[in-house]
């Protein structure tokens, strides 16, 4: 199903023509309306007319999260507050929050982008969608809510938390679509089982998950527990919120709304633009934002672009599922370690539950990596030999994937922390001056 077939199936040359035109307009717009960008462009002697082809974006300096924080709260807004009808922000847990503003046109575009991705995943009028994202300053809840309503889908604004009530609403209201983080979907399956309810007996058919990434192995685990199809959508507050990209029912990458966002992949260390198909850091430029347009925003998310058309008929480029974050990557004993690598190993193991925790600590001058893994059940907790065999199997598999030795610790079921939002998988206990 298409929401805007003309755009979603537009020939590649026409998409590029549209992007170039909107990119030139955006550069001219920020030059006139955002002093921060005007200074950056003047320092590089760069004008809108210097952008003659899409590749000329490389002339434009990057924007970082730190730039947004330094201009807190409204320093990067391109419109006066009289024209800003909505404000969202990040959590600000590591400093000043990132504040973003939306005009009426921004909200209309945002809603349309989200509706496209829901339709691509299989959402339709007649569905009942339960939004288990928070509805505060976080963009996830409102972004999905308005995109769903725009399609005529019934929305249950459940918000996050109160998990037993979430299951009750699913059962009583006939929920067919679940919107949450993937880790919370896993937790909800446990809650349902504790209530004597098999999640597979509920009406939920489709999961629209975002807020955090998940591996293919984790996807299969959730699909089996719920008997639902799981899709992933991607976005970030700094750019718009959810609606940047999302998977269709083919589950072969996330379609980017290219008429609103121009994507690039760069080397996370050098900033050099990488050719199609190479893995690197995703950089996004907004092409239609009025409230707070951003040029070449460094997302820190690691992925690659798939230029070939999808089997669903859409011609927009797709991005591979995010493989990790450049700033979440751990360097342990000189080796780059992404949590997703560990997750892909654990989910495939027998007797192991889907919940885990990665703990890094330093012994003298050496870093040690410990992986705490929940058992799926307590049936063999008193069988010492069986537990040691499982630990050794996991340790060997992680050694082959990561090329470093890892300490594995099995823990009882339901003992690791659960969360209604993003799962906190990594605990780094090295001193504050130690490099990650």
Image (spheres, rainbow, N blue to C red):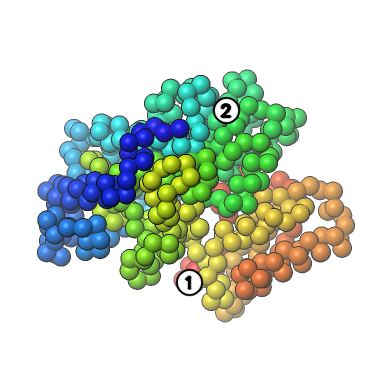
Residue 305 shown left or right of residue 371 in the figure? left
Determine whether 85 is above or below 352 in the image: above
Can I make out residue 309 in this image? yes
Can I make out residue 240 in this image? no
Work out which residue is located at the far bottom of the displayed protein and give it: 365
Determine whether 278 is above or below 202 in the image: below
76 vs 51, nearest the viewer: 51
Q: Please report the residue visible at 47 percent of the width from the left and 41 percent of the height from the top.
A: 312
Residue 176: assigned label: 2
Rendered location of residue 57, percent (x, y): 24, 59
Residue bearing the label numbered 1:
435
Residue 315 shown left or right of residue 223 in the figure? left
Residue 60 shown left or right of residue 223 in the figure? left
Q: Secondary structure at mark 2?
A: loop
- Between the residue at mark 1 and the residue at mark 2, the CA separation in whole angstroms equals 45 Å
Quadrant in which the N terminus appears: top left
State the image quarter where residue 187 is shown: top right
Residue 281: assigned label: none
Mark 1 touching mark 2, by CB under 8 A? no
Q: Please report the residue visible at 56 percent of the width from the left and 34 percent of the height from the top.
A: 206
């Amino acid at each position: 199903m298409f929401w805007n077939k003309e755009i979603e199936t537009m020939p590649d040359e026409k998409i590029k023509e549209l992007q170039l035109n909107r990119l030139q307009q955006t550069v001219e717009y920020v030059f006139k309306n955002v002093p921060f960008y005007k200074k950056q462009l003047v320092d590089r002697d760069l004008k809108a007319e210097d952008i003659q082809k899409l590749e000329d974006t490389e002339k434009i300096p990057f924007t970082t999260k730190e730039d947004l924080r330094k201009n807190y709260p409204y320093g990067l807004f391109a419109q006066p507050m009289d024209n800003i009808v909505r404000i969202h922000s990040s959590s600000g847990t590591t400093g000043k929050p990132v504040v973003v503003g939306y005009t009426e046109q921004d909200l209309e575009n945002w809603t349309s982008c989200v509706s496209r991705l829901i339709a691509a995943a299989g959402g339709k009028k007649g569905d009942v969608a339960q939004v288990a994202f928070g509805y505060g300053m976080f963009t996830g809840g409102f972004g999905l809510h308005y995109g769903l309503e725009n399609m005529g889908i019934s929305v249950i604004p459940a918000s996050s938390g109160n998990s037993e009530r979430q299951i009750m609403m699913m059962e009583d209201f006939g929920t067919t679509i679940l919107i949450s983080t993937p880790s919370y979907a896993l937790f909800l399956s446990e809650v349902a089982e504790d209530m004597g309810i098999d999640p597979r007996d509920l009406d939920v058919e489709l999961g629209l998950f975002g807020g955090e990434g998940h591996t293919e192995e984790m996807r299969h685990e959730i699909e089996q527990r719920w008997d639902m199809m799981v899709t992933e959508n991607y976005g970030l507050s700094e750019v718009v919120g959810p609606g940047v990209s999302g998977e269709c029912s083919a589950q072969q990458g996330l379609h980017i709304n290219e008429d609103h966002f121009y994507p690039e992949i760069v080397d996370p260390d050098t900033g050099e633009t990488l050719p199609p198909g190479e893995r690197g850091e995703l950089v996004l430029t907004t092409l239609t934002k009025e409230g707070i347009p951003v040029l070449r925003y460094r997302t820190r998310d690691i992925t690659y672009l798939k230029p070939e058309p999808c089997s669903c008929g859409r011609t927009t480029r797709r991005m591979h599922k995010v493989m990790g974050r450049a700033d979440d990557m751990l360097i342990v004993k000189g080796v780059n370690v992404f949590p997703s690598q560990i997750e892909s190993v654990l989910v495939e193991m027998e007797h192991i539950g889907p919940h885990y925790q990665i703990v890094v600590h330093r012994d003298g001058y050496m870093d040690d990596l410990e992986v705490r893994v929940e058992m799926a059940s307590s049936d063999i907790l008193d069988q010492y030999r069986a537990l040691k065999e499982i630990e050794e199997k996991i340790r060997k598999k992680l050694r082959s994937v990561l090329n470093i030795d890892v300490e594995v610790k099995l823990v009882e079921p339901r003992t690791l922390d659960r969360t209604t939002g993003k799962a906190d998988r990594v605990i780094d206990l090295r001193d504050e001056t130690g490099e990650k």
